[in-house]
Amino acid sequence: MLKLYNTLTKQKEEFKPIVIGKVGLYSCGPTVYNYIHIGNIRAYLNADILKRYLTSIGYEVRHIKNITDVGHLTDDDIAQGDSGEDKISKKALTENKSPEEIARFYEQAFKKDEDLMNILPANYFPRATAHVPAMIQMIEGLIEKGFAYKKNGNVFFAVTEFEKYGQLSGNTLANLKVGARLAEHPDKKNPWDFALWLASPKEHLMKWSSPWGEGYPGWHIECSAMSMEYLGDTVDIHTGGEDNIFPHHEAEIAQSECFSGHKFVNFWLHNRHLLVNGEKMSKSKGNFYILKDILDKGYSPMELRLTLLSSHYRSQMNFTWDAMEQAKSNLQKISAWVANLKNISSGENDSASEIDFVHIYQKRFEEAMDDDLNTPLALSVLYELITETNKLLSEEKLSATTAKDILGFWEKINKVLGLEIASSAIEVPEKMFTLAEERKTARDNKDFQKSDELREEIEKAGYIIEDLKDNNYKLTKK
Ligand code: AMP
Ligand code: ZN
């Protein structure tokens, strides 16, 4: 039974879809004015793992990920009455290109990064600029129903009209008043009202005609309009990073539910942030790595994927190069294990004893994933199986049939993990990993004489074994 932590109810809940066997999934996508950083990748990877796991347990998933190609001003900018250019337009002006050229370039770059990371493409990547009429229609509906008001070509959502405001983030109006911080926009009735539409000065690059004059939509309305268009009034699951909870997702709920009269999202899933030196990785702080930085350091996208999967999406994760080293070593271990299994399973000799333990690992893997997508636990189940298999190998007790079963298990769980290992070069032969695993067992048993002998054997063969944290190791060629 799959349980997911729902930010709305603040607890793990059994996942139940609206329509049996189907899941509507919406993920907030990138603002395309720059390369995505690896914190963003963490958010998209989490949605990918969720989608892959739902698919593996039999659901048909329809996944929508928007492309924010309207370059919004931040809520703080708006509150302070800033009517300057947005991020996409600013970039266009500095690079002497049109906003559209900038947006298309970074949209392609984003899709390429997702592809390198083996993040499955969404069924559809709707662009905000292609959905402005739907946004205008929603805003008109909200004005008609009395949830929004217009002034001087701007339209704001009146948060006081929506009783449930604050249900997702805890930022109810009472709480907000205590921590009031925003400067008041001259046209807002209440500082917490948020923009649905903003008038733009004539010289603005990105603007559209509307019943309220020339302007551009607020950021939050695009996700509501596109989610409703492609997934209906109520969606099963909506994902994003924790910074999206407020104001973005709180605003999405308010405007969507007031417009349609229905619940907007059943399950809200938010990943916690990827940190660098204890601080949120973000474009504005300048403390971020993009995928190219990782590749330039000699690591592969799959090593990054494994690093990110090694921590639960709901715990903060500090990015370190040590963690990348660990993932590199683990990925090699997995590659060598798979190569070994392929060798053995193609063998004829099937006289070794049959050991049917795969189903136990399968069950444990599913239990880990069922528990709010606990990927670190699921990976530890895999590592345990590798150790057990390597032990059997060294004792020559692994039959072709068992190897085939284990290989079948690997292929099944790797549809969820999404690790492309075939292409990752195996610099170190399988035999060395078998010796390394034996040495690990010897060290676990405090048999240091055997451990030293095994190290010598590995070194004589031309490889180096380095000890890492928690009795892990790294094997490289001399
Ligand atoms: P943005 O382009 O800033 O809207 O971010 C795209 C997605 O990445 C959103 O779901 C964000 O919540 C998420 N995100 C941004 N920064 C981080 C971070 N440091 N760690 C994890 N997720 C992040
Ligand atoms: Zn969104």
Image (cartoon, rainbow, N blue to C red):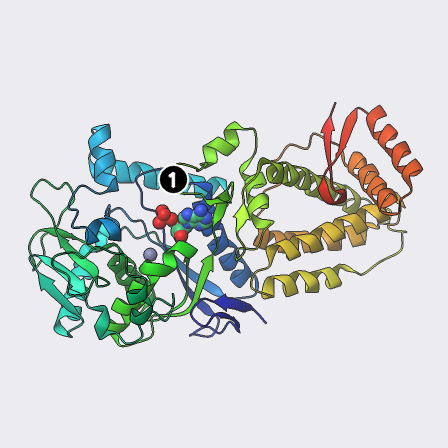
Label 1 CB less than 8 angstroms from ligand 1: no
Q: Quadrant of the N terminus?
A: bottom right
Q: Residue at x 14, y 54 (%)?
A: 198
Q: Amino acid at mark 1?
A: Lys
Question: In this rendering, does residue 352 appear at all?
Answer: yes
Number of residues whose C-alpha sits closer than 10 Å to that of mark 1, classed few (under 14), some (14–19) or many (20 or more): few
Residue 477, percent across and down? 73, 26
Question: In this rendering, does residue 97 appear at all?
Answer: no
Considering the numbered disc 1 on the image, is that residue within a helix, a strand or a loop?
loop
Q: Residue at x 89, y 55 (%)?
A: 353
Numbered marks: total: 1
Q: Pick the residue in front: 224 or 312.
A: 312
Instruction: Name the image quarter holding residue 154.
Output: bottom left
Q: Where is 459 relative to 186, above or below? A: above
Q: Where is 314 relative to 286, above or below? A: below
* Residue 356 located left or right of residue 35: right
Q: Pick the residue in front: 363 or 292.
A: 292
Q: Which residue is mark 1?
A: 285
Residue 8, percent across and down? 42, 70
Q: Residue furthest front?
A: 178
Instruction: Name the image quarter holding residue 322.
Output: top right
Residue 208, percent across and down? 12, 50
Q: Residue at x 52, y 52 (%)?
A: 316
Q: Where is 204 relative to 408, above or below? A: above
Residue 224, percent across and down? 28, 62
Q: Quadrant of the C terminus?
A: top right
Instruction: Name the image quarter holding residue 18.
Output: bottom left
* Residue 266 located left or right of residue 390: left
Q: Where is 16 relative to 212, above or below? A: below
* Residue 25 located left or right of residue 163: right
